[in-house]
Image (spheres, grey):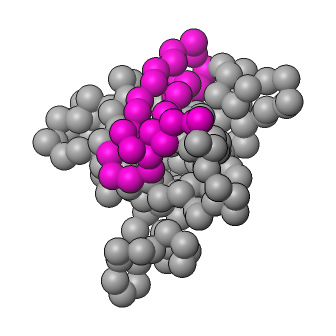
Amino acid sequence: MGAWRRLALGSAVVLAAGCTTTPSATPDTPTGASAATGCGSRIETEALPDWADAGFSGDTRVPHVFGAKGEIVAVLFGHPLTADRQDGANNKILWVARRASTPADPAASADLVITAFLDGTDTRVSREVTGGPGPSIIDLPRSGCWHLDLRWSGRTDTMDLVYADGRATASGT
């Protein structure tokens, strides 16, 4: 195997490992804290679960990410998600919440509130989807692994989403 091929293969293994490490969260460490160790939420390409496929027809094989508790799924129509998009596309995400086993907290906002933490930094941003889980455009300011805390109707879940560098994607590097 040539030196370039070994280097490329080694780089791919390192990149893949960096995106599959599970965040280290303890009861005292909030999910998304900068002490987290990597991107743990995997992009699925299997069919959406029955509870999330309303409005779809046929074999619904679209990239999606499940929340850690399985309470919500992010259907990625803007895959790959990209910071500083140069291609004119959107970071469209359809948020689908699993039907609650108990009634929603009437005092809690129905809006989906997303608090996103960029892994390995102190960068934190908030986004909101008015009316709760549903269609959205979620742009984040930088590329990298983002840990998301999700809150809606008195419910919570977490997930990680990776945003690619739009400038590098646009230039083909």
Left or right of 102? Residue 135 is left
Query: What residue do we see at 79% from left, 24% from top?
Result: 29
Left or right of 55? Residue 73 is right
Residue 86 x %, y %: 17, 35
Query: What residue do we see at 38% from left, 53% from top?
Result: 134
Left or right of 37? Residue 60 is left
Residue 9 x %, y %: 54, 50
Query: What residue do we see at 35% from left, 74% from top?
Result: 55
Q: Is residue 110 magenta?
A: yes
Residue 137: image quadrant is: top left
Looking at the rendering, the stretch of residues picked out in magenta corresponds to: 107-136
For the question of whether residue 148 can be seen, the reply is yes
For the question of whether residue 11 can be seen, the reply is no
Residue 22 x %, y %: 73, 43
Question: In the picture shown, does residue 136 fall above or below 118?
Answer: below
Left or right of 157? Residue 24 is right
Question: In the picture shown, does residue 121 fall above or below 16?
Answer: above
Q: Is residue 134 magenta?
A: yes
Residue 163 or residue 9, whichever sits in front: 163
Most extreme residue toward the right is 27
